[in-house]
Image (tube, helix red, strand yellow):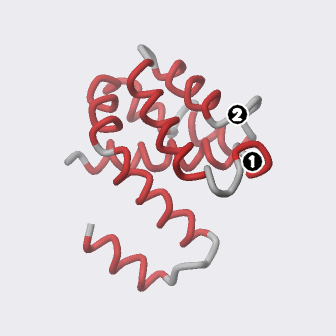
Amino acid sequence: MDDELMDATVRWLSALLDSATVQEIGVSNWWSRAKTALETAAASADTYSQAVSVAARKLQIDTLRQASSAQLLGPGSTEDVISPRLDEWRLLAQRDAVYIVGLVQIQRAARRGKVSPVDLDAQEAML
């Protein structure tokens, strides 16, 4: 597994979810919608910009928040890693969608303080 591409994919999906709203998606659909958005983008996009746009539509995102844009676009963003390796990314995203969503869940829970850093380190070591 390519750690750089996996990390960029986790950051990519998390950045998109930062622009999504529970009011649009619903709590019960949040993670299944995230998985579907990732899979659909990977299956149908021919360019990085299409992948972002397809996933955003699936997540009912009309406009990206500024922080999401900074993570997704421009220098130092996930675009730098994913765009030149789009074919590899598409295979990774389709093959490992459940795993990727799981990593995003762990990362976002840690960011909100729901998982201690020790627990997060232990979970990442197991993955």
Residue farthest toward the top in the current orientation of the protein: 46
Residue sitting nearer the eye, 13 or 33: 33
Location of mark 1 (residue): 21
Residue shown at 43% from the left, 18% from the top:
44
The spot of residue 43 in percent (x, y) is: 38, 23
Residue farthest toward the right in the current orientation of the protein: 23
Quadrant of the rendering where the C terminus is positioned: bottom left
Residue shown at 70% from the left, 33% from the top:
60
Residue shown at 62% from the left, 47% from the top:
17
Please name the amino acid that badge 1 sits on. Thr
The spot of residue 94 in percent (x, y) is: 33, 35
Q: Quadrant of residue 5?
A: top left
Please name the amino acid that badge 2 sits on. Gln
Residue farthest toward the left in the current orientation of the protein: 1
Mark 1 and mark 2 residues within 8 Å of each other at the beta carbon: yes
Count the labels in the image. 2
Label annotation for residue 73: none
Location of mark 2 (residue): 60
Secondary-structure class at tag 1:
loop
The spot of residue 30 in percent (x, y) is: 61, 51
Residue 41 sits above or below residue 17 on the image: above
